[in-house]
Image (cartoon, rainbow, N blue to C red):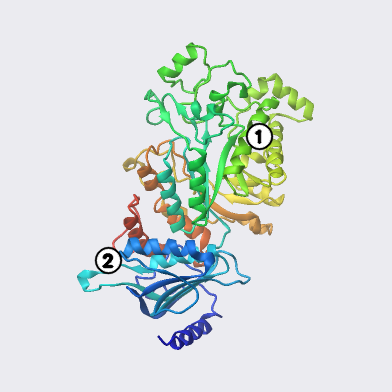
Amino acid sequence: MNRQPFFLALIVITGLFTSCDKPYKNFENRPDDYTIIPAPKWEQQLPGRFAVDQNTVIVAQDGLIKEAEYLRDLMGAQFDINIPIKASAGHFENEIELRVEAGDLAPESYELVVIPDKILVKAPAAGGVFMGLQTLRQLFNVPDRERGLEVATITGVHIKDAPRFSYRGMHLDVARHFQPVSFVKKYIDMLALHKMNTFHWHLTEDQGWRIEIKKYPKLTETGAWRNGTVVGKLPWTENDNEVYGGYYTQEEIREVVQYAADRHITVIPEIELPGHSSAAIAAYPELSCFPERPTTPNHGMLSAKSMEQQQNGHPKVVYEEWGVTNDVYCAGKESTFAFLEGVLEEVVTLFPSTYIHIGGDECPKGYWEECSHCQGRIKEEGLADEHELQSYFIRRIEKFLNEKGRQIIGWDEILEGGLAPNATVMYWRSWDDHKAVITAANEGHEVIMTPNSHMYFDHYQADPEHEPDAICCLSPVQKVYEYEPVPEAVRALGKEEMIIGAQANVWTEYMKDADYVEYMVLPRMAALAEVVWTPKEAKDYKDFLSRLQGMKDLYDQAGYNYAPHVFATKKDSL
């Protein structure tokens, strides 16, 4: 084939549009095929279509083989065609070229060109190429044999794109309700589809410890299983008396981390401390300020098996209610820090992420006020009160992790008593009118926005009268979409750069199975994707809804369960 016409066309295309840096806003005339979420920074329709047929090949540099295999598998599943992968040398009739091209753009930026005989996806790094592939898959037009179409086609387009924020995250709590590795991988695939780059894996809680730690086997032998669970919503009147739990082996953890890495997603583990730790205390009661005191639920709903264990001399059991308990790690005992350092020694070998999330939220101070060890620590360290004791606790763990080359993230309670020097703050308590965000940003700490007002996907997304049980509140898709991560007060201080992104949290008290998790997450994740990727000035909710129809098709193809509330047929007026 004579390649000269293609390259001349590509040069012309690139020359025409290189200087254009405004988002594509011609919503009224955009074809149905251009239903990309999150909306690109800039896009331009091109004439013609690329046909996927028996001559199609994927051309990739050596460093992009995994991305090429990912694309091949996607297209194979969607079009029932086996597309070969070729080295970058040579030219082919109908090629999809993946290319890394060094430059000064952000690593996750990419450029996508589709013309009738070639597709080019290029970026400064492999992560950018992968993001471009997520856009490409949304442009796939599946063969419509009812209309006589025998090949898949991809509409002509030129896109230049880059994310607004470097941190784009989704959280999943597997401690309240455990999910198997197969679903965790499926969840990671959902993140990839939406151009998310961070998976926050909430692995430990009062209600269950989910990660194997070889030095402390009782954490999974005992801490991973609770003897029952409260039924329904407050006020609880029943416990199901069924043993419940599960955990991930270290081999499974590594498998998930690699699966995510292949999709350019970083897995950040969360090991809760000093509060939300009663599952660990059930396994090792000496971690408590008062090992002899029985685990006492706030609302008295304890299973028959747990009551029997306590009567037989085993006072500590895994917590069976939702909420907060007074039994937290003892801050006054050196053995507590020896235990946590032993746990984190193994955690950092499993997770290569720069960040380790250490929780730091909702830590009642009642036991510390009574504990002679904790009061001794306060006096010895010259601390003012129990809030400063918590800060001491966090700083000490941070120092240990910094020595391992890691940094900590904590919920915004870690600000109380003084912030650890290198910590990143995850802001969730939206009722404080951004005071925590302003404080952290002013002191030079990066902030990730996860306010419960908008970013808690365990909240109802439609009329609670017609929805399954959720924790509370109402956060519909439009509310999520309209969230702005940079508060005006932070902008006024000139500290916008300290807001590095946003994340939605999925707490699973009422999400017993994977289908319900998917239902609560989709399509709100699509709204979040546009919040953290698309330029603020390019967002438009009405246009988002029209493009959401294309995302629905992808959900259906993948077999995802989703809430139908905001979807309309293409004939509907949005």
- For this orientation, the residue located farthest to the left is 146
How far apart are the two marked residues, 1 and 2, measured between alpha carbons?
A: 59 Å
Q: What mark, if any, has residue 571 been given in the picture?
A: 2
Question: Relative to residue 110, is residue 563 depicted above or below?
Answer: above
> Does residue 357 appear anywhere in the picture?
no
Image depth: mark 1 or mark 2 in front = 1
Q: Quadrant of residue 395?
A: top right
Q: Amino acid at mark 2?
A: Lys
Side of 492 relative to 285 (left or right): right
- Crowdedness near tag 1: few (<14), some (14–19) or many (≥20) residues, C-alpha within 10 Å: some
Relative to residue 528, is residue 426 depicted above or below? above
| Tally of numbered tags | 2
Label 1's element? helix
Q: Measured from the top left, where is residue 6 in percent x and y?
A: 44, 84
Earlier sequence position, callout 1 versus callout 2:
1
Residue drawn where x is 68% and y is 50% of the image: 445
Q: Amino acid at mark 1?
A: Glu
Question: Which residue is situated farthest in the top direction here?
Answer: 312
Visible residue check, residue 252: yes
Q: Which residue is mark 1?
A: 341
- SS label for mark 2: loop
Q: Give the camera-side residue of 121 and 574.
A: 121
Task: Name the quadrant of the C terminus.
Answer: bottom left
